Amino acid sequence: MAVLQNFVVDVVERMVDNVLEERPEVCLCARCRQDMILRSLNHVKPDYINEEMLTVPLEDLDEEIFASVLSAVLESVEVVHKYPRHDKKDQVDLSPAYRNYSEDYLDIILTKALSEVDDVCTCDHCLYALKVSCLTEMEPRYFSSEKGRLFVKLAEMDNQLLCQTLVLVYRSFDQIRKSPAHLTPEQIKGFS
Ligand SMILES: [Zn+2]
Ligand SMILES: [Zn+2]
């Protein structure tokens, strides 16, 4: 199956670096930069569809996306500048891979829900479409890896989150029943 990728990550990284260039008074250490990126990512709607975001220059982005990324980044730079965590003794994994832990949580819920139905296609294309459909509506949850694992553990005990997620999961099942993702757009048009 194609690997899930939130294309907003790349845009946020570029925007953070752009903003930091104009703010020489802000700390540029790896931890502060990572905190700014993680915090920004949690405030921008994820996009698992528009791969062209990887190559489009920031100034050519859709205006609404540009504005929402910029405002998340500006706010995150302020917060991290005001409350830097670079002096904290705790070990932080400064890996360049930013992970949306909603993906991990969704995998658990989706696997259970799929085991209870037998009329939803789970071919690679359909499974991918199911995940993208849910993740686009779920809150993004970007954390350092230790906090991320803790989130998934706690999330499994959160009934409200389970209900919200199941609504999205069942809705995505309906979408796939009506128009399976393994069909070409022409085949889908043929149904209507
Ligand atoms: Zn710093
Ligand atoms: Zn399929």
Image (cartoon, rainbow, N blue to C red):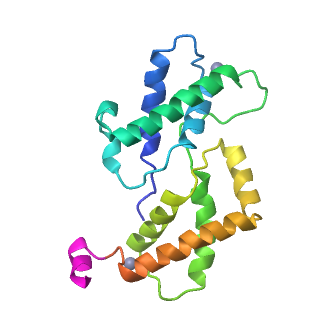
Residue 102: percent from the left, percent from the top? 60, 56
For ligand 2, which image quadrant applies?
bottom left
Q: Is residue 84 visible?
A: yes
Magenta span contains residue 116 = no
Comparing 146 with 81, the one in front is 81
Foreground pick, 178 / 145? 178
The residue drawn where x is 61% and y is 49% is 141
Q: Quadrant of the N terminus?
A: bottom left
Q: Which residues are magenta?
A: 183-192
- Residue drawn 41% across and 73% down? 126
Is 188 magenta? The answer is: yes
Image coordinates for residue 5, horizontal then vertical, percent: 45, 52
Task: Measuring from the top left, give residue 137's x and y in whole percent.
Answer: 52, 59
Residue 95: image quadrant is top right
Q: Position of residue 78 (x, y in %)?
A: 60, 24
- Which residue sits at x=51%, y=88%? 118
The relative height of residue 78 versus residue 130 in the rendered view (above or below) is above
Instruction: Say if 1 sits above or below 61 in the image.
Output: below
